[in-house]
Image: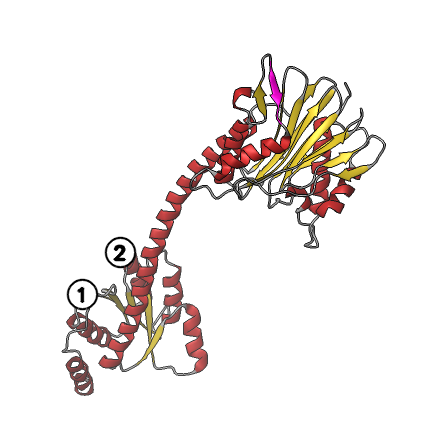
Amino acid sequence: MWGPTHGLVKSMLQNARFAFPDVQETCLRRVLVVDDSLVQRRILTLMLRRWGFDVVEAEDAEQGLALCDTFQPDLVISDWMMPGMSGVEFCAAFRATPRTSYGYFILLTSKSEKAAVASGLESGADDFLTKPVNGDELRARINAGARILSMEQELRAKTAVIAETLSELQTIHASIDKDLQQARVLQHSLMPVREAMFGKSRVSVLLQPCGHVGGDLAGMFGTQNGDFGLYSLDVSGHGITSAMMTARVAGYLSPDYPDENLALARSETDFDFLAPKAVAARLNQRMVRQQGVTEYLTLAYAHVSAGSGRVRVAQAGHPPPILLRRTGEVAFIGNGGLPIGLINDAQYEDHVIQLDPGDRLLLYTDGFTEAVLPDGSLLDEAGLMELLQSVPEGASGSAFLDSLYAALKRRTGLGQDFDDDISAALLEYGGA
């Protein structure tokens, strides 16, 4: 027996006399050799150690599994046919063992049938070597395994970086989300009340941002002589930048600080209302002169003379207000106008209407008319008219606006997230 075996050993070791390329740099260093043949194990072990690998041996699969717990091999070379647990069964058990990294598995076999190879692959084997093992082929197989393990190690490193980055992003997101929730509270504080009475007339407002904060706003303010104003505005874009612009414009139309309100001018005893077209022009001047600001806004603003029921309306690129007569007549007010903040010295018009007790005026943003329906079309003005007709007859004030918003949600689909902010202001004229 020693004669032929000695010749085989001599030949294989001669092939193994050259150092394994880049073995110190590869992530494949620890090798487990499992074979019931002592000679075969020693041949493989001698070659591998000459190539610079750290090698341990096992005479059967059970012993090999026990070594896996402590040795944690990067590569396993196992014979297929062994007493007790076969190499295929050992491979399946090895794959079931918890590991922190991937282990490359090569089966030694004299089998060449496709069914046998398929069985080995299904058990988790990565490669096969035909006995007797050729040194050059073994080195080529190990090189292939080293490349795979290197890619796996690189992937794990990148995954760890991604996981760490994701954790940091989640922390940042939680902080931003907390700030945005507070910003939402602050934005709603710009509308201190949802309803206000001005003599016998009532103004109600609705604000539904599509995110935490938005660029829509609606509000009202009055003076001691009984006159009052209401507005609906929509800053371009969404999110934090639009919300900051909205907060700034809200200061220009503040109900609490009439000296700073662009719609009012101080008189000897009180404040007088400026014409809505003048208010739009003054606001446009402020917006245009802001350096580095690219946002603009649309506005519908109405001044109501409470004693006479005379209303002047300015429309600046905003959807046309809707006049709902007590008699059932409905009409759109205005013919467009330029948005505010685009063109210096833009001019605006006043539209005058006469209200009777029981008449209503609705200002709204394009979040209503541009809401997307299930078929992909937009609600548009005709659809908004249908929604208004669906509001319960006795609904008034904020209940009217809430019913209108609920009807919009039903029309677009329950639970739908709107792509735009939605807001409105409703005037219900009660007479002198």
Q: Position of residue 212 (x, y in %)?
A: 53, 37
Q: Report the predominant secondary structure element of the magenta stretch.
A: strand
Q: Which residue is drawn at 46% across and 79% down?
A: 115
As drawn, 117 above or below 373: below
Task: Tell me the SS state at disc 1.
Answer: loop
Q: Mark 1 points at which residue?
A: 24
Q: Residue at x 72, y 21 (%)?
A: 306
As drawn, 159 above or below 323: below
Q: Quadrant of the N terminus?
A: bottom left
Q: Distance between the residues labelled 2 and 1?
A: 22 Å
Give amino acid for label 1: Gln
Q: Residue at x 75, y 24 (%)?
A: 309
Q: Give me the disc on residue 422.
A: none
Q: In this view, does 30 lie to the left or right of 416?
A: left
Task: Tell me the SS state at disc 2.
Answer: helix
The residue furthest top is 269
Q: In this view, does 266 lie to the left or right of 304?
A: left
Q: In this view, does 48 lie to the left or right of 299?
A: left
Q: Residue at x 70, y 32 (%)?
A: 401
Compare residues 90 and 340 and report the one nearer the observer.
Answer: 340
Q: In this view, does 285 lie to the left or right of 110?
A: right
Q: In which quarter of the image is residue 232?
A: top right
Q: Mark 2 points at which residue?
A: 70
